[in-house]
Amino acid sequence: MNENTKSENLLHVDDIHTYIGQFHILQGVTVEVPKNSITVLLGRNGAGKTTTLKSILGLTPPSQGKIIFKDMEIHGKRAFNIVNLGIGYVPEHRAIFRKLSVMENLKLAERKRGDLDKHADFIFELFPDLERLYKLPGNHLSGGQQQMLAVARALVPDNDLLLIDEPSEGLAPILIQQMMEAIRKLSQTTTVLLVEQNFIMASQLAKNFYIIDDGKTVTTGKMSELIHNEELIHEYLGASVRTVKQGDEA
Amino acid sequence: MNHEKRKQFITIVIFVAILAILIAVVWRTSGTTTFVRTALSGLTLGSLFFMVSAGLTLIFGLMHVLNFAHGSMFMLGAYIGWQFYTNPTFVFGIAPLIIAFATGLQFLTVIKPRLTQLNLSESLQNLLPRLAWVLVIILVVLAILNFDILGLANTAMVAVTTVTESNPLAELSPQEPLARFWLRPFFLLLGGFLAAVAVSKPGNKKEYVAAEHTTRNWLLIGGLIVATILLTVFREAWSEAILLMNGNLRFVLALFVATGFGLLCGMFIEVLLIRPLYTRSFFIVLMTLGISFVIKETIQFLWTPLAYKMVRPPLFAAPGKAETVADWLLNSNATLNIFGVTFPTYRLFIILLGFLMFIFITLLMTKTRLGMVIRAGVQDPEMVEALGINVRSVFTFVFALGIAMAALGGIGAAPFIPVQPLMGDQYQMQGFITVVIGGMGSYVGAFIGALTLGLARAFGDYYALKWSLSTAVAEASTVIIMVIVLLVKPSGLFGKKE
């Protein structure tokens, strides 16, 4: 059984605790990410979803607990070492490099020479806009285009796992659709761990969910079950329920 | 976003317009000859200011470190280059020791991946590095025990005063005999190796480092060991060979030696002293101040607080005035006729050096991957790390590069200004003002700011003399410019808004 889970799950996060300064942000987060599927982290603002991603990456290293990626212990390693094992990161707030051109932003994400050439076709198929904007500096891009660039950047090297933080944040509905399509397409070849406030998007994309509240994982299960569990949604995702209703009206 | 760009553009246009009007007025009132002479002097100063401020602004932009040791590094570069040029005994006396220690440290790249994978008990993991550090200290003390470093420095001073054209080697006193000396680099090599062991935290599996480029690293270590042995065995032969060399070539080598020394120094300082303090920026300021004091005192100890004059390289030394550049290159004249002005050729070289450095930085920042990483790191180092780039090593490189540029500026300035322990202080001060005017973190801003300050200084001096004012006016002019720029644009000419 144990061996079985090992091969099925790409990433194990086992009871991690993370401090930022003096604040005990994560107080026991456990997440299993199965291969070739989308897993979503849900929870209120400030529940610790972003910190969970950053702890996996080693940007805010956990002080306690285990993180295993591709059967290797990665907790405590330096961030750039962890990332180079094959993890792509799409941060929240579209943290692209504003002074660098689109091309440079993508080039910078190369791990080996030629990575960009290898994946350029796939990237431009997902986000045709970027090809047109190739030479423009990042700060000339619109919010949606910046978000696309942020996702595209994670696709440049060969990655086994993508950590995507709030891809729909601040996007117009039509762009959300496009982003969803893109994530669905790339999840056919890569495993995705998603943080998403937009419940519609999360529910349509993800197979499994984890709810994080006050720095702890509270519950987990199949997305298909969560959709019908209004009680759970109401208790932990208060803010998100409104999104559901708004979505219904739209 | 676009609006911001336009605003910046307008500020620059206004700035250039004011500058142009000022230049026109000055030109009218002073006449062409005076104008050209003063402007060239200003450009010389500006070039020197740029060589100091380029490193300051890069280091601040990426790491937010105010490096108060920058002026001292400028001075150190001048001393090392001057020593290498006039009498290499000192440089070759200490070079084996430095290279030996660096070679030992270089083992880090190949032993760390193995050591971290060792199975050691917790207490052993704690004990081993400490033991290693104690041994390092003992070895370093043993290595420098009774080492007559003052003698080496003194030898050089004697030689400076007595070197003649015909026989420059007459006064070279011998180095310590090899039979006794060889132990010093050997101990330091061991010491460096043990320091590498201590730093790599044996048994700590969390400190995982992939074994990459193993052959390349071993080759590098092999090369360094060979270099150490060659430098150790042929200390005197190297010094003689250098001194018998053509003076111009020797000067070019001196530029490289000073730059390389600055690069090494910068690397050591960043890794050992600055890196542990990144989370406490105030302590970094104190640390760099402390470093600058240590360097100044060491230099005073070695060469006394006296000021020395470095002889200009032969290309700029022959008496007489050249009419054209070709003429100068042929006859190596000390002065050149530019628009009717007799101007020292060496100062032209300084201007050239400053402009070349600007071109170099521009190419580095815009055309290379490293430059891309630096520009991205200025905005968001964490995200750069999250793309799989070792930001720490980029920090080290940028710090070392900044120091190396200051050191190059120092040796470039040495034949032009007196070589003395405080020579860097004034340039550091002007460097900081330059960085503030140009905008923290912008090398283009530093370049324009440096040239502006240099010109203001030169013309200030000219008018102070003309209207018989105090020269303090010229010195104050740079600060006045800074105040005006800060009032109009608080983030500096090319600075980004916070």
Image (cartoon, coloured by chain):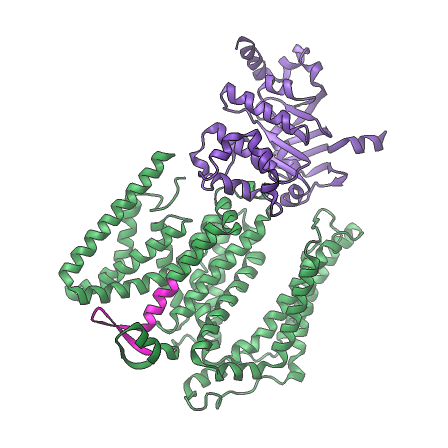
Tell me the residue at 34%/57% (across/down).
B450
Position above or below: B447 against B411: above
Residue A90 position, x and y percent, is 58, 33
Position above or below: B202 against A30: below
- Answer whether residue B338 is magenta in the image: yes
Q: Which of the image's four quarters has the N terminus of chain A? A: top right
Position above or below: B493 against B112: above
Q: Which chain is purple?
A: A
Q: Which residues are magenta?
A: B333-354
Residue in front for this viewpoint, A38 or B459:
A38
Tell me the residue at 56%/87% (across/down).
B174
Q: Is residue B66 visible?
A: no
Tell me the residue at 46%/68% (across/down).
B76
Which quadrant would residue B467 be assigned to in this image? bottom left
Q: Is residue B306 visible?
A: yes
Which quadrant would residue B452 be assigned to in this image? bottom left
Residue B278 position, x and y percent, is 54, 49
**Picture colour for chain B:** green
- Answer whether residue B82 is magenta in the image: no
Tell me the residue at 51%/55% (across/down).
B398
- Horizontally, residue B247 falls left or right of residue B90, namely left
Position above or below: A53 against B81: above
Residue in front for this viewpoint, B371 or A226:
B371
- Horizontally, residue B165 falls left or right of residue B476, namely right
Residue in front for this viewpoint, B125 or A171:
A171
Residue A12 position, x and y percent, is 74, 33
- Horizontally, residue A129 falls left or right of residue B451, namely right
Residue B97 position, x and y percent, is 61, 73
